[in-house]
Image (cartoon, helix red, strand yellow):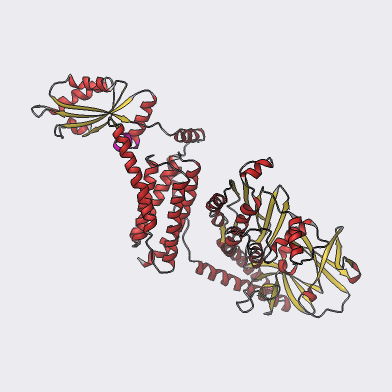
Amino acid sequence: MEKYLTLFIEESKENLQKLNDEILKVEQDPEDIDTMNEIFRVAHTLKGMSGTMGFPNMEELTHRMENILELFRSEQLKVNSDTIDMLFECLDTLSDMVDNIIEGEGDFRNDSLMDKLDKIAEGNVEKEKDVSKKAEDEVAATEVLDQYELSVAQRAKGMDYNTYKIDITIASSCLIKSARAYMIIKRLEENGEIIKSIPSIEEIEDEEFDYDIELFYVSKLDTEEVENLIDKISEIEKVSVEQIKVKDKPKNVKTDNKKKNKGKKKPKKKNEKQVSDKVKINQSIRVSLDKLDNFMNLVSELVIHRTRIEDISSAYKINDLNETLEQVNRITTNLQDLVLQMRMVPIDTVFNRFPRMVRDVSNQLGKKVELIIKGQETELDRTVITELGDPMVHLIRNAIDHGIETEEERIADGKDPAGTVKMIAYQEGNKGIIKIEDDGKGIDPDKIKEKCIEKNIDVEGLDDDQIVRMIFNQGFSTNDEVTNISGRGVGMDVVKRKISNLGGNIDVKSEVGNGSTFTIELPLTLSIIKSILVCVDNENFAIPLEFIEKIIDVKEEDIKMSYNDEVYMYNNEAVPVIRLNEKLDIDEDDTKEKVMVILKVGQRKYALMVDKIEGEKEIVIKDLGNSLKGAGYYIGATILGDGNVTLILDVPKLTT
């Protein structure tokens, strides 16, 4: 079974995430039968997969979990926070088992958890026995009727009909059993309807039964009247009539049906439906990430050599090469777009973990928090998505712990008792934007200023927005109490570093009493980007085009001094000046003519001074390797058409 192991792991993770999502829905609406059935189906699939692959502990735990789900479905066990916590504990354990399988250690046994599940199941079985003793004359409908027959009985109850289970034994001396049974059925159907017969009506007509008949019957007659109807027929040895307990049809089922009917559209023609179904089949396949990365590398090499051919054609003015080169350009551009699309993954793969996390953290802190997610279909590069999880966890946990107030505090401030955290994602140009918003108490700049003074950090001349951004400094925390949620000062600086390593930027806006908004800007891809090549003292560097707002020729006298810092007036705004040669410790060119590159990082602008601009290039980002990783102000390197290696500047790091 080894060749199926990868598929098993992938599908197990998908099924566990599906269970997480559906159990959260059931907690919000315990009467949602459709969701409960979906949970049962997914759990059953997971159990079958585990058994097939030879993981008995995983199979057994899922089976015990199914027992609890069956109690939910049969309404023998109520959905509450304790039972939901138990199910989530099962999912966490199953997730740990999958991780163990990935590590090659196989699944493990959790006897304590299985015992808890057994006690819950056994306790409710005993409870059900007690109930049945108090109502011995009633039989639960779900034990004897299938879904269709039960729905008939439920509709009949709504019209004031009773449902009965009738056991009849025909005398052994009877010569024609089928005729006697026909008389019973005819007499009963004059006053009601038979919804089920054991044996079936066909078997009774063909006399393929012994002397016992079991009927399920709906009528407005009471128990005694039903017995009298059958007693009047001769050659009947025994009659037993029991009323069946039928529960009302769940309200949400009616609502769903109304919704379905309300939005019902004209059905497609049969042929049209068959064609559309065929189109949807086998339209996607699973591809190894290693193969996808290898494909990306090959396309990247092709882009590098295409640039080299363009330089040769331009240098030697080979006209015959131009037409072919245009075709190569078109093909490589299409290939490049295709491979980038293949690497794009919906951000939902990151977002889908947070509804469960918000529930657990808010319960732990005793706060009411509603999570709103928008734009989960937004796509980013797989590499970005893979690294995005941890920073998002920090931001969400901080929003609940630091931002959202307690229920009492919110009521006192005239707010809704339940706080709101929003996760919003969308694309803007060649960037992906993610916003984390909360409607809590916001970040108090005065409190941060006090902490800065305690740590001997100079904040003189900084406005409130700049002071609030101090939370991204290493080891900085405004929380006086250290908890297992936050307060150790190891969160926001890690977030900023992670986002910066991805070639992105994070900014914060906060208003005291009205909450905070963290905005993350990320490149859609980390592989092939457009850039501007700049030169400082004959050294070339690449700047990602997404950070560049404008390029301006300037002279030294255009630069002014303000509060001992150099600024450049751009659109009536004093923009801080960054001299690239000073940042990178390179000798300055004596030329008086300079070029100012206006950079936009988040909502802030900077003026980067360089010697000259070499032009725009499409470049392939190459990793610097472990030995140079994190060194200086660089996110990577690229190979130009002439074969020279050029470093790519890390703009967010350069501007801090």
Q: Is residue 593 above or below residue 386?
A: below
Q: Residue drawn 44% across and 69% down?
A: 103
Residue 171 at x, y = what percent?
11, 27
* Along the line of sight, the residue nearer the viewer: 333 or 650: 650
Quadrant where the C terminus sits is: bottom right
Check the image and name the residue furthest to the right.
557
Residue 324 at x, y = what percent?
64, 71
The quadrant in which residue 462 appears is bottom right
**Residue 332 visible in image:** yes
* Along the line of sight, the residue nearer the viewer: 386 or 397: 397
Quadrant where the N terminus sits is: bottom left
The quadrant in which residue 381 appears is bottom right
Magenta stretch: includes residue 143: yes
Q: In this view, does 330 lie above or below 234?
A: below
* Along the line of sight, the residue nearer the viewer: 578 or 621: 578
Residue 513 at x, y = what percent?
71, 47
Total labels: the figure holds 0
Q: Give the range drawn in magenta.
A: 139-147
Residue 311 at x, y = what percent?
70, 76
Magenta stretch: includes residue 495: no
**Residue 426 visible in image:** no
Q: In this view, does 365 lie above or below 474?
A: above
* Along the line of sight, the residue nearer the viewer: 593 or 407: 407
